[in-house]
Image (cartoon, helix red, strand yellow):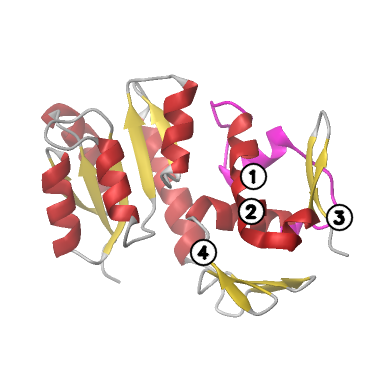
């Protein structure tokens, strides 16, 4: 099996080397970019890139601009690295389609764990893994969601969130439990991250968005009519 390619984008060479060394140990093929312009060029030349690790503060083209550019034609998973811890920055990242958000300084082992979690959940699912509840169908292998037969366009994390809700249909889920399962392990962020994703997910689902019920003071529950 060919090695999965990961693009690491950071203007600090020491940071790129640190991340690369940990990923190479896990048998990934790592490409490097020192700024946003170089990152976009490399991504366009390498369609098989499986995931991008992207720093925010960079010369020529910052991480937000790179994310917006790549999201205009690709849903490749993106992990954003930033020295900022401002909630507004984090929400901006999710609005642009960032799948994970990690603040510096961080543990390289935790970063690799998040990389592996995303790649495992996006590429190692059974071909016949289909969920169908209340007119909503999820093909987990093909990463396709349809509502009453019509495709809806979801980000990677929105897809995971809806899948988790449907797999736990009728069960009340706390925000903490959702974070630990959809974000795959203890997530050091604000639970309002979930609310942001749920709001966007409901909007994309149209009337079927009502299936995601809010349980005040706790979390959410998926319940089809």
Residue 206, position in %: x, y? 68, 61
Residue 120's place in the image compared with 52, above or below, is below
Question: Is label 2 in a helix, a strand or a loop?
Answer: helix
Residue 13's place in the image compared with 26, above or below, is above
- Identify the residue under disc 4: 153
> Which residue does the image show at 42% across and 56% down from the upper left?
119
State which tag comes first along the sequence, 4 or 2. 4
State which tag comes first along the sequence, 4 or 1. 4
- Identify the residue under disc 1: 199
Front residue of 101 and 71: 71
From the viewer's perspective, tell me whether residue 158 is left or right of residue 76.
Answer: right
- Do the residues bearing badges 1 and 2 touch, measured as CB atoms within 8 Å? yes
Front residue of 192 and 111: 192
- Between marks 4 and 1, how big is the CA–CA gap? 15 Å
Front position among marks 3 and 2: 2
Q: Give neighbour class at mark 3: few <14, some 14-19, many 20+ (Cα, 10 Å).
A: some
- Identify the residue under disc 3: 170
Image quadrant holding the C terminus, namely bottom right
From the viewer's perspective, tell me whether residue 74 is left or right of residue 172.
Answer: left
Residue 106, position in %: x, y? 37, 25
From the viewer's perspective, tell me whether residue 174 is left or right of residue 72.
Answer: right
Please give the range of residues in magenta. Answer: 166-191
State which tag comes first along the sequence, 3 or 2. 3
Q: Is residue 170 magenta?
A: yes
Quarter occupied by residue 46? bottom left
Label placed on residue 203: 2
Question: Is label 1 in a helix, a strand or a loop?
Answer: helix
Front position among marks 4 and 2: 2
> Which residue does the image show at 14% across and 28% down from the upper left?
12
């Amino acid at each position: 099996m060919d090695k999965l390619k990961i693009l690491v984008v950071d203007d600090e060479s020491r940071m790129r080397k640190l991340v690369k060394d940990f990923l190479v140990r896990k048998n990934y093929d790592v490409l490097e970019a020192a700024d946003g312009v170089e990152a976009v060029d490399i991504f366009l030349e390498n369609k098989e890139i499986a995931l991008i690790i992207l720093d925010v503060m960079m010369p020529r083209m910052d991480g937000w601009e790179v994310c917006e550019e790549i999201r205009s034609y690709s849903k490749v998973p993106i992990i954003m690295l930033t020295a900022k811890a401002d909630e507004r920055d984090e929400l901006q990242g999710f609005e642009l389609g960032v799948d994970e958000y990690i603040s510096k300084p961080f543990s390289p082992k935790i970063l690799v764990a998040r990389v592996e979690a995303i790649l495992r959940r996006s590429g190692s699912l059974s071909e016949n893994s289909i969920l169908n509840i209340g007119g909503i169908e999820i093909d987990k292998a093909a990463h396709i969601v349809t509502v009453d037969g019509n495709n809806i366009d979801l980000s990677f994390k929105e897809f995971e969130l809806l899948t988790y809700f449907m797999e736990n249909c009728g069960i009340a889920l706390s925000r903490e439990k959702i974070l630990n399962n959809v974000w795959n392990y203890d997530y050091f962020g604000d639970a309002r991250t979930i609310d942001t994703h749920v709001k966007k997910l409901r909007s994309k689902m149209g009337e079927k968005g009502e299936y995601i019920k809010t349980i005040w003071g706790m979390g959410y529950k998926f319940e089809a009519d």
